Image (cartoon, coloured by chain):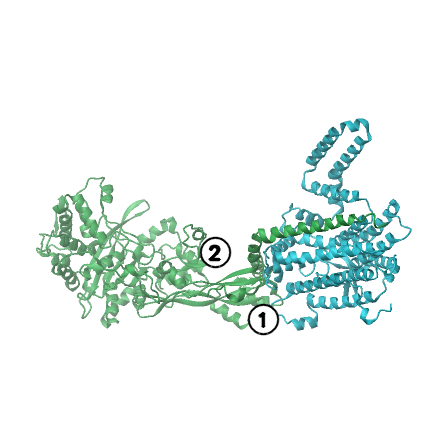
Chain colours: A green, B cyan
Amino acid sequence: MSVFNQSRKRVIQFIMLGTVLVIVSRLFFLQVVETKYSKLADANAHLRKVIYPSRGIVYDRHGRAVMRNEALYDLMVTPINVKNIDTAYMCEILEIEKKEFLRRVQVARNREGPRRPSVFASLLSPDMYGKLQESMYLFQPGFELVQRPVRSYPYGVGANFLGYISEITPGMLGDTSGRYSAYQQGDYIGMTGLERTYEDILMGQRGIQYLVKDNLNRPQGSLEGGIFDTAAVAGKNLRLALDIDLQVLGEKMMAGKIGSIVAIDPQTGGILTMVSGPTFDPNLLAGSYRAKNLGILFTDTVKPMLNRAIQAAYPPGSTFKPITGLIALDEGVITPSFGFPCHGGDGLCGRFSRCTHSNPGHAANMRTALANSCNSYFMHIYRLSVDNKKWGGTKNGQAKWVEYLKAMGLGRRIGVDIPSEAPGVVPDTARMNRVYRGVWNSCSEMYVGMGQGQLILTPMQLANAMCIIANRGWYYIPHFVESIDSDNSDKLKKYKEKHSVAHISNDAFQSVVDGMHDVVTSGTARKAQIEGIEVCGKTGTAENNAVVGGKLVKLKDHSLFVGFAPKDNPKIAIAVVVENAGFGSTYAVPIASILMEKYLTDSISAKRKPVLEQMLAANTFSQEIKNKSKLDSLNSVNYAGAEGAVIMRKILGH
Amino acid sequence: MNRSQAKLTAGIDWPVLGMYLALVFIGFLAIFAAEYREGDNVIQNLLSQNKNWARQVLWFGVSIVLATGIWLTDSKFFTATANLFYAFGIMLLLVVLAIGTGVKGSNSWLELGGFRFQPAEFTKLCTALALAKYLSAMETDFTKLRSRLIAVGMVMFPLAIIILQDETGLALVYLAFFLVMYREGLPGVLLVIAFSGIVLVLSALLIDKFILLYIFTGVAALVVYFNRFQIRRNKSRLVVIIAVWAFCASFVMYVVPFVFTNVLKDYQVRRIYVMLGQENDPKATYNTRQSMIAIGSGGLLGKGYLKGTQTRFDFVPEQSTDFIFCTIGEDFGYVGSVFFLGIYVSLLLRIIFIAERQRSTFSRVYAYSVASIIFFHLAINIMMTIGLAPVIGIPLPLVSYGGSSLMTFTMLIFIMLRLDADRQMVLR
């Protein structure tokens, strides 16, 4: 019976072997041919965890930390472990409603799933942290505190140039140049100031740790014992030329005023202080209420986020006269003994220009003309410079004159090591052609000789110009960072190169410097005198207009002062601008003088204390500025809110 | 029964015993790999029996006791009690149907003092014995339709009960007995019809039914055209062609849609569609996808024992039972997988060889049953892990974790070994 169907054994064997052959060939495809599965398995099982290093610390010239890191705490929640806790007590500490508590747990669950921790409350205030820390055992294991480093500013100054960090924007992440390729969503990056310029140095090197995870994304330990991990390297520290005492004093004096101060060490180009008023406490942008504060600051009428020292440009007024003189001397169109017959005004180019002085001989030479700030003298020597036969025509002469300005770092971005520098405006050929529709001569813009007209400069450019005069013809590009700890890159190379801009004899220079010294000893800047130190300076009172309500309105003059000290072997060059505050001698001179005294003698003499008090108390906000701000829809600000008022008090120092 | 101590192992088929032990050992390694985490205390786990691999050791001990018992039993015992086994098995199935404990959507488990037992596994053995007994009976003439219907009925009865227990996977394994009956004389055309039926079902699922209708009509027209002379002589040929056409058409137009909407459960329909690549619901495809990632990531040589990330970190579900092959594929790669399949194929061919050398029909039918059951489990289980078959929960014989399964297959194989050892004794 069995013999009948013995051949069927073959069929059954064939079916079995055929099936196994199908399996084997399918396995060959899955395991040998197709490579995507091992990638998928790695993606499943490997967790790439980024370890953030602490950012570099920033020190002033005496090694005092002005920007450092502080640990704040985030409260993390693991939703699945939240059970049997005193919810009411937790809500009381965090000052939230029960409904909000449940909402946040739900948000965390949606964001990271029930088994992974996610942020429940970020950057806790010290008060909340203290209370939570004490009773943490009540809330575990569902809640835990996780340290999170944030920036802190022990002196609460320097907001405008130190800058802030914030989460990288989608726009940056979408950048195709590869500049931000190392960043991921949620990373912090320097947005402004030194934080931005030196981002690559301050950031340090992020570490990467590879973990293996299970199907619920729970880490199960390091991959292959950590052989693929890279350790985090802390950011490098920056050492600034900044004098933090000077900065604090400057910011205090600029409270209640709009304007700025720039002080530079002429021998190195290092910025000693840079104040933009009104400013704000940089800690406002680091802690728990960062986002809210940022919004308030951005929309504020007085633009506290604007760094007026490099972003605002002003007509320099009389403070420009030393530069006019310097160019004329370098071109050789005058000598230091060149005189001009001014009798209290002059009909240059058929127009009458008034002078402060009318006594004969007040402009008998460069030195006296500077000391007496003779408008006619400097307009005249400007004309001599641009009409110089050497260049063949006024237009070429004007171009040459502008070239001088550019060489001195005026009317262009000098290259300071913080972003967003404004170039200012100088009367170059293109601009002259546009303003005068192609028909112009040396008379057209002769007012630039006395620092008005088509000429606006930033306070930093003015301070740098003072460095050139103080150094008798050369400067370093102004910069904050003098050195970077354990760094041998050439990041700072361009700040170590000396730039020579004038080629005139020391004697000729001396006439400009002497003239500026006379301004302080016997001229308009007598308040700038410091006992035992020879101070050189020049005041300026700049006319300015603004469009208010569609009409051109003449505003109160800007108060300016530029100067340096000591006269020989200069250690500090300074420019001060106080907007709409009247004569240069009223505010700019005392402020500059007190800062120079503080820097050079490390103290303020008793008899100058009243001046300091006066400066600290003064408020120069003009009605016009307030009107303008209210009309300007972009700057509309809500003063009504209680928080706004708190911030304003902080900004204004009340 | 008076074998001396020296003859205790006389007549045993060593290759089968060797492959049995090899597969159980590989299974143990795979279960261990699926569960072991770095730092686990192996001894403590073994003693406290809180891991599947530790329990599998215990089940293996029990299986060895059972195997020894079977080996020491006279082979006549099994021929004599085959029908009793069958009756007992059916009774167990019915009891389970009434009071079964639900595990993952099925009611096929019987709980006995803390131990769970799946009678559907055990009944395979009973059915194999009963079928062997029936086909070897002197009065059975398997060329008769009546005998064939009785034999099919013996197989379909437990199958139906198991389907009622919602264990479709285990029920499908009973179709393995058709392979046995084919060997014993069931017409080969049945296999062809079954194969055509599968193709018909698949095309009904994959291709729009109206397009299929056009294809069938076109094919029928062509067949009629090429047979036009024969048809002129013999009209019944035309009737047959029209009947086949009508059956195919109504099958795809009405039967398949009806079965899929009214008979099969939602999850079963979804699994079938997933297997056919027709559905992309990530929840439905999760198991298959993770399993394919695990096996595929093994590569040519594998990640090394205990190095697989997919299986060790619970990405693959049911990894110590139904998806145990993932661990082998991931840790040992293509080479290891082929070697592993090689052991199975050798075992199957060896059992067929053993079957054909039997002098008694009972032993031959029984041995073919063992081979067919193992083959069905192997084919469906592995094809499921590599996306060639829908996810049907059946274990890999001797390898998957599970006491019922391991004990059933041990008994199946050792009863066969006992019968084989006694093949010279008598012609049954």
Residue B162 percent across, percent down from the top left: 79, 54
Task: Answer whether labels 1 and 2 touch (C-beta < 8 Å).
Answer: no
Q: Which residue is drawn at the image coordinates 76% and 34% (left, top)?
A: B245
Residue A329 percent across, percent down from the top left: 13, 54
* Camera-side mark, 1 or 2: 2
Front residue of B134/A452: it is: B134
Front residue of A642/B407: it is: B407
In the rendered structure, the residue with mark 1 lies on which chain?
A
When asked about the image quadrant of residue B316, the answer is bottom right
Badge 1 or badge 2: first in the primary sequence: 1
The C terminus of chain A: image quadrant = bottom left
When asked about the image quadrant of residue A152, the answer is bottom left
Q: Which residue is mark 1?
A: A138
Q: Is residue A478 left or right of residue B330?
A: left
| Residues at marks 1 and 2 on the same chain | yes
Q: Is residue A489 left or right of residue A531?
A: right
Q: Which residue is drawn at the image coordinates 82% and 31% (left, top)?
A: B236
Q: Specify the amino acid type for callout 2.
A: Gln
Relative to B310, is B239 above or below? above
Q: Specify the amino acid type for callout 1.
A: Leu
In the rendered structure, the residue with mark 2 lies on which chain?
A
Q: Residue furthest right?
A: B139
Q: Which residue is drawn at the image coordinates 80% and 55% (left, top)?
A: B355
Residue A378 percent across, percent down from the top left: 15, 52
How many labels sit on residues?
Answer: 2
Residue A439 percent across, percent down from the top left: 19, 39
- The numbered mark at residue A185 is 2
Badge 2 marks a residue whose secondary structure is loop
Q: Circle 1: is it few (<14), some (14-19), or many (20+) Cα within 10 Å?
A: some
Q: Circle 2: is it few (<14), some (14-19), or many (20+) Cα within 10 Å?
A: few
